[in-house]
Image: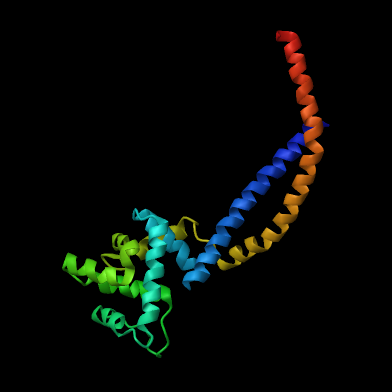
């Protein structure tokens, strides 16, 4: 039955396309999370907050990457100049136990610290040292402290826009099955297309006979 085969062809194609997009999204999320050294939870909220603040994701993530890299340098030998920037903002690179703070916690501390720099020119100059030119627009999100970020982060969670780690892992596991599904889909396509094209050809010939 050509109609049944064609329907199956379309259904599998739609499901495969959806799953491909979903796995691509979560794979990208995990990759960027690993690259920056922040949790997927924070990254999803950061992306949402940045978009809602009118900041392109590419610029926001580059700014975050620059900030975390500079924070890492400030914690090492030869990073005195950068450490002084953090010190001047009242931001400690370590917690009360002397352990290096997580990147996401450090970012929020930085947001609160930069908000206390009242002179706009000084705030811009200080932010530039840690965010670089690509990330300076993050001031639209954190210029007045971490409050706006936290508010938008809660909003993202309440809207159900934040995937938990279990779901992300589940989608990653599904990717393996998706590859098998693609192979099956291609097999069905090979079976469906010849009779489908033949039927379409007959339909065209019939149409020409009626209206040609």
Q: Which residue sits at x=53%, y=62%?
A: 29
Asked if residue 148 can be seen in this view, the reply is: no
Question: Which residue ends up furthest to the bottom in the rendered image?
Answer: 97
Residue 26's spot in the image, x, y percent? 57, 60
Quarter of the rendering containing residue 165: bottom right
Seen in the picture, residue 7 relative to 16 is either above or below; the reply is above
Left or right: where 200 falls relative to 118:
right
Asked if residue 110 can be seen in this view, the reply is: yes
Q: Quadrant of the C terminus?
A: top right
Left or right: where 192 falls relative to 87:
right
Residue 9's spot in the image, x, y percent? 74, 39
Question: Which residue ends up furthest to the left in the rendered image?
Answer: 119
Residue 43's spot in the image, x, y percent? 46, 65
Quarter of the rendering containing residue 134: bottom left
Q: Quadrant of the N terminus?
A: top right
Seen in the picture, residue 11 relative to 44 is either above or below; the reply is above
Q: Which residue sits at x=41%, y=69%?
A: 65
Left or right: where 119 falls relative to 3:
left
């Amino acid at each position: 039955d050509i109609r049944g085969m064609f329907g199956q062809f379309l259904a599998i194609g739609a499901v495969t396309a959806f799953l491909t997009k979903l796995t691509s999204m979560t794979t990208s999320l995990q990759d960027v999370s690993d690259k920056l050294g922040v949790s997927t939870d924070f990254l999803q909220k950061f992306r949402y907050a940045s978009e809602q603040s009118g900041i392109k994701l590419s610029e926001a993530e580059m700014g975050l990457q620059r900030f975390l890299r500079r924070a890492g340098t400030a914690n090492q030998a030869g990073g005195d100049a950068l450490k002084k920037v953090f010190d001047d903002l009242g931001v400690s690179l370590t917690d009360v136990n002397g352990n290096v703070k997580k990147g996401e916690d450090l970012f929020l501390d930085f947001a609160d610290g930069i908000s206390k720099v009242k002179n706009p020119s000084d705030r811009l100059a200080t932010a530039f040292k840690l965010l670089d030119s690509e990330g300076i627009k993050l001031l639209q999100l954190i210029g007045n402290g971490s409050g706006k970020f936290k508010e938008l982060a809660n909003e993202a969670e309440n809207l159900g826009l934040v995937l938990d780690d279990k779901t992300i892992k589940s989608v990653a596991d599904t990717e393996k099955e998706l590859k098998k599904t693609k192979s099956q889909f291609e097999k069905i396509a090979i079976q469906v297309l010849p009779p489908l094209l033949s039927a379409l050809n007959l339909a065209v010939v019939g149409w020409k006979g009626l209206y040609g």
